[in-house]
């Protein structure tokens, strides 16, 4: 197995015992990203800003792994309020183009640091 740990300063540092992403051959498994600003490591205020920051953070990790969000094949979105799901769809369309990745959206009781949204992804590189 060819396992490579992906790390970038352009996304928040891991706040636990995990890597930002792990690449195995052509597949990259990206850890969940919340709306943390990578410079201050502080949570951005508001659901819209957090959604944008989540996708920016995932994009930074994808870039560090020599890919982009266009290479994402599976996306999992976790929300503390599923009422925000329509907004996730609207904002996601600014970061992804058709054909869109497979996706799941899950309502959860809480997320790290009081975040309102989190997303992780699987990316396959050509």
Image (cartoon, helix red, strand yellow):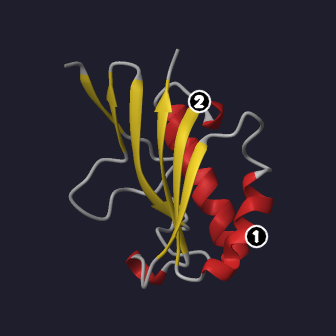
Which residue is identified by label 2?
71
Q: Which mark is residue 102?
A: none
Name the side, left or right, on which 39 lies relative to 68: left
Please, is residue 51 above or below residue 26 in the view? below
Q: Residue at x 58, y 43 (%)?
A: 102
Residue 114, position as x, y percentages in the image:
46, 84
- Left or right: 44 as drawn, with respect to 13: right
Instruction: Tell me where residue 12 appears, x and y as whole percent.
Output: 45, 57
Check the picture and name the quadrant holding the N terminus: top left
Image quarter of residue 30: top left
Q: Residue at x 75, y 70 (%)?
A: 86
Q: Is residue 73 above or below residue 93?
A: above
> What is the crowding at mark 2: few (fewer than 14 residues within 10 Å), some, or many (at least 20)?
some
100 and 37: which one is in front? Answer: 100
Q: Quadrant of residue 98?
A: top right
Residue at 62%, 53% (x, y): give it: 55
Q: Position of residue 107 (x, y in %)?
A: 51, 76
Report helix, strand or loop for mark 1: helix
Q: Residue at x 58, y 59 (%)?
A: 54
Q: Which residue is mark 1?
A: 87
Label 1 with label 2: CB-CB less than 8 Å: no
- First in sequence, mark 1 or 2: give its number: 2
């Amino acid at each position: 197995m060819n396992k490579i740990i992906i790390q970038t300063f352009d996304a928040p540092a891991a706040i636990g015992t995990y890597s930002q992403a792990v690449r195995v051959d052509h597949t990259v498994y990206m850890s969940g990203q919340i709306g943390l600003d990578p410079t201050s490591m502080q949570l951005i205020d508001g659901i819209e800003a957090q959604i944008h920051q989540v996708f920016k953070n995932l994009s930074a990790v994808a870039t560090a792994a020599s890919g982009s969000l266009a290479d994402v094949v599976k996306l999992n979105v976790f929300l503390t309020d599923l009422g925000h799901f329509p907004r996730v769809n609207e904002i996601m369309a600014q970061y992804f183009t058709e054909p869109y990745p497979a996706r799941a959206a899950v309502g959860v009781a809480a997320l790290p640091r009081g975040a309102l949204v989190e997303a992780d992804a699987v990316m396959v590189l050509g």
